[in-house]
Image: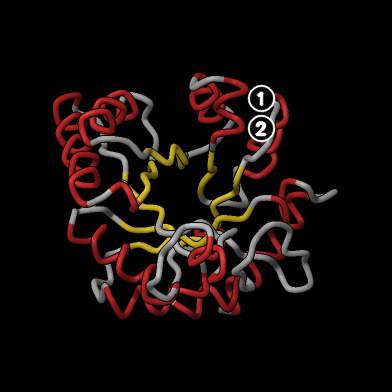
């Protein structure tokens, strides 16, 4: 892949117009566009087709499914029809839920004769640090052990990859040595950028060197006065990694 193809641009905006404007501007400069809860709940799922028409070749639907296996399977059948490149589920939903998501995605896609979306399991939100994991969530396992533990469960359940902070990428690679297992990394900030609400961050070059497959980057691009130039600079940093 070219460096730009590793960039997943997060369209974390509350306006369909702004999302389509950004897609048209950045379609030649990033590899994937991420649509999450903010935009979906503002514009509805029809925004996915509009983004595709605006030039997005791959769409990452950050649905973060987390429910009983039967409910997640039902949601996945609908998501397959949306034609997205990938979809997220929460790894903490458990092995049975993850398996239901994966099996349903592949079965429904085969029935409809469409490509199956990649299923990525969210390990731990990048806004959560070690103290919050222990004190707010009641998890005694150290963060650098907990994330690889969830990643291994996701791999064993058949997921295509995980969402993990750049700080845990190397540990995930050690826990899951399969080179085809993808690690999608949020919490990436270009050198000198503010961290915002992210607790565990690295620069693009550092994240790629650690073993990340794709980088999710939102505000440093979409909030920039020149999103195209911001994406180009990030691609350059990725190339250095």
* Position of residue 90 in the picture relative to residue 13 (left or right): left
Describe the element under mark 1 as helix, strand or loop.
helix
**Foreground of the two, 165 or 239:** 165
Q: Mark 1 packing: few (<14 Cα in 10 Å), some, or many (20+)?
A: some
Report the residue marked by disc 2: 19
* Position of residue 217 in the picture relative to residue 193 (left or right): left
**Foreground of the two, 51 or 78:** 78
Report the residue marked by disc 1: 16
Position of residue 204 measured from the top left corner of the image (x, y, whole percent):
60, 70
Q: Quadrant of the C terminus?
A: bottom right
Q: How is the image coloured?
A: secondary structure
Position of residue 239 measured from the top left corner of the image (x, y, whole percent):
58, 74
**Foreground of the two, 197 or 204:** 197
Q: Are marks 1 and 2 in contact (CB under 8 Å)?
A: yes
Q: Residue furthest right?
A: 225
Q: Residue at image x 26%, y 35%?
A: 68
Q: Is residue 210 above or below residue 189?
A: below
Q: Is residue 216 above or below residue 45?
A: below
Position of residue 220 measured from the top left corner of the image (x, y, whole percent):
73, 56
């Amino acid at each position: 892949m070219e460096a730009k193809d590793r960039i997943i641009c997060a369209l974390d905006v509350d306006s369909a117009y702004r999302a389509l404007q950004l897609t048209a501007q950045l379609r030649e400069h990033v590899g994937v566009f991420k649509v999450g809860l903010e935009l979906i709940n503002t514009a509805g799922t029809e925004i996915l087709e509009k983004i595709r028409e605006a030039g997005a070749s791959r769409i990452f639907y950050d649905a973060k499914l987390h429910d009983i296996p039967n409910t997640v399977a039902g949601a996945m059948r609908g998501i397959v029809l949306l034609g997205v490149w990938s979809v997220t589920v929460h790894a903490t939903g458990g092995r049975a839920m993850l398996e239901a998501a994966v099996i349903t995605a592949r079965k429904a896609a085969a029935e409809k004769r469409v490509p199956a979306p990649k299923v990525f399991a969210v390990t731990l939100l990048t806004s959560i640090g070690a103290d919050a994991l222990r004190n707010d969530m009641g998890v005694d396992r150290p963060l650098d052990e907990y994330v690889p533990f969830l990643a291994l469960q996701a791999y064993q359940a058949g997921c295509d990859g995980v969402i993990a902070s750049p700080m845990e990428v190397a540990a995930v690679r050690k826990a899951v040595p399969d080179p085809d297992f993808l690690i999608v990394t949020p919490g990436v900030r270009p050198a000198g950028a503010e961290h915002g609400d992210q607790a565990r961050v690295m620069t693009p070059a550092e994240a790629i060197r650690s073993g990340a497959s794709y980088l999710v980057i939102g505000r440093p691009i979409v909030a920039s006065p020149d999103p195209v130039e911001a994406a180009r600079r990030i691609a350059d940093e990725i190339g250095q990694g």
